[in-house]
Image (cartoon, helix red, strand yellow):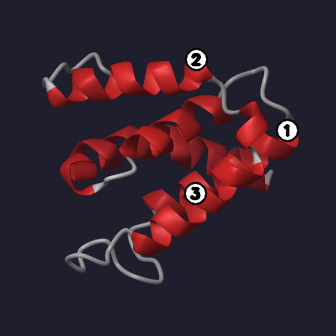
Amino acid sequence: MVLTQKEAGVRRDFFPKMKRVLANVPFAEDVVAAYFCAFDPATPMRAKTILIGALAYFILPLDVVPDFVLGLGFTDDMAVLLAAVNVVRVHLHQRHRDKARDTLDRMRQGDPAAV
């Protein structure tokens, strides 16, 4: 039940937040690759749970270091996401990274169908 609620929130709020903060997130490709891995049917449930938890933290409007704090705002998000990615690294495949890179390129070009 909790995963389903977090999953729905991540699906709903992830890309709108990425569009807002894209220029300020130096680890955007890792974040978007983690998103695609989390929602890949081939990803084991344990890995999905870890990634969705980390992605939910990323989209929270308030966290340990608020995102609007210049220079520091995404450090806590980065730490949580990179720790999650490190734990599930074996399930994060090149296809997730390729799809993330393509999606980010289209987002940067203003393609409304990028997500």
9 and 53: which is toward the camera: 53
Calculate the distance from the C-alpha at mark 2 to the C-alpha at mark 3: 18 Å
Which residue is located at x 77 percent, y 36 percent? 90
Q: Which of marks 2 and 3 is nearer the N terminus?
A: 3
Report helix, strand or loop for mark 2: helix
| Mark number, residue 54 | none
Q: Do the residues labelled 1 and 3 touch (CB within 8 Å)?
A: no
Q: Taking the image as drawn, is residue 5 in sight?
A: no
Labels 2 & 3 near each other (Cβ < 8 A): no
Q: Residue at image x 66%, y 25%? A: 93
Q: Look at 51% across and 27% down and name the residue there.
A: 97
Does the image show residue 69? yes
> Which residue in the structure is indicated by mark 3?
82
Dot 2 corresponds to which residue? Answer: 95
In the image, 40 versus 97, the foreground residue is 97
Q: How crowded is mark 1: few (under 14 residues within 10 Å), some or many (20 or more)?
A: few
Label 3 Cα crowd, 10 Å radius (few <14 / some 14-19 / many 20+)? some
Q: Which label was assigned to residue 45?
A: 1
Image marks 1 and 2: residues in contact by CB distance under 8 Å: no
The amino acid sitting under disc 2 is: Arg
Of helix, strand and loop, which one carries label 3? helix
* Residue ranking furthest to the left: 110
Residue 28: percent from left, percent from top: 37, 45
The first of marks 1 and 2 along the sequence is 1
Dot 1 falls on a residue whose secondary structure is helix
Amino acid residing under circle 1: Met
Q: Which of marks 1 and 3 is nearer the N terminus?
A: 1
Disc 1 from disc 3: Cα separation: 19 Å
Q: Which amino acid does label 3 sit on?
A: Leu
Q: How many residues crowd around disc 2 within 10 Å: few (fewer than 14), some, or many (20 or more)? A: few
